[in-house]
Image: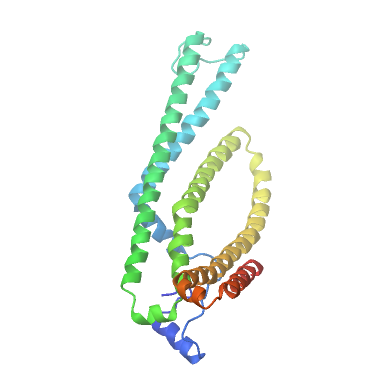
Amino acid sequence: RNAGGETPAAADAAGAGGGSLVSDEDRYSGTVGAGVFMAYGASLGGIGFAVWFVLLSLGLELTSTGGSAFLALWADAADGKATSPPPFASDVNPPPSYWVSVYFALGLLSTAASLFRNFAWFEATFRASRRLHDRVVSALLRAPLSFWTSTPSGRILNRLSKDVGVVDQELPDYTSDVLLCVVECIARLTTIAVASPIFLLVFLPVGVFYYIVTKYYRGSSRELKRLEAIASSPLQARFAETVEGLPSIRAFGLQASERRAAAAALDNSNTL
């Protein structure tokens, strides 16, 4: 199926009805479907990887928050404000070696959790990129002849270059940042709510306001990304056709006209 959900045969029929063999490149509109996220999650490793990654993220956040809380206890003890013994100690004012040892252990645990989390994530995203790329290549190799006659080569190159590059490089970083931000926000909000429950009265209206703002931003950003993806296909097609036809272009002295055509295609892409 193409980007608009049509099968190759349906696209050919639409193109033939309009007097053109090549079908127009359609694009989705609206929010990204849940099936897209589920497909990427399945490529990452499914439920098993999700549970393992959540546990590592929680361990990282717990050790990080625990280090900050322990540092606050250390400061209270140094100022003489401690009223009860700290964890793993029987004295209200333990020796400095205790504070350094426990804080150092929490730092090691936080570092280990971060290393394991990052390694697990990048290994899973590498596996997902390879699986998705293999599925795209397999679909292209099994595509009927009608698909190749109605789909420009630039559109195929765009899928195998720019789109695959986004899956390989940008999507793992964005997804990791989102997941880490969600875990951190939950931990921070829980800590603040326990310390000062009245904060929830302020958080609710602020949260609704941010949701409304991000809703408009996500819609605009999503549609711009889709337009950018469609606009790059003619450039890819022009480049591929120029490379394939270099002998003919040089033989007939059409270098200047080809440069003008490439510049016009680039201008159209930028103005879109």
Could you say which is closer to the camera, residue 28 or residue 192? 28
Q: Is residue 141 visible?
A: yes
Residue 217 at x, y = what percent? 64, 59
Could you say which is closer to the camera, residue 201 or residue 138? 138
Q: Quadrant of residue 146?
A: bottom left
Q: Is residue 194 above or below residue 19?
A: above
Q: Residue at x 47, y 76 (%)?
A: 248
Q: Is residue 24 above or below residue 270?
A: below
Compared across the picture, whether 36 is left or right of 207 comes to left
Could you say which is closer to the camera, residue 134 or residue 113? 134
The quarter of the image holding the C terminus is bottom right
**Count of labels shown?**
0
Q: Is residue 173 above or below residue 31?
A: above
Q: Is residue 82 visible?
A: no
Residue 27 at x, y = what percent? 53, 72
Q: Is residue 86 above or below residue 209?
A: above
Q: Residue at x 43, y 81 (%)?
A: 150
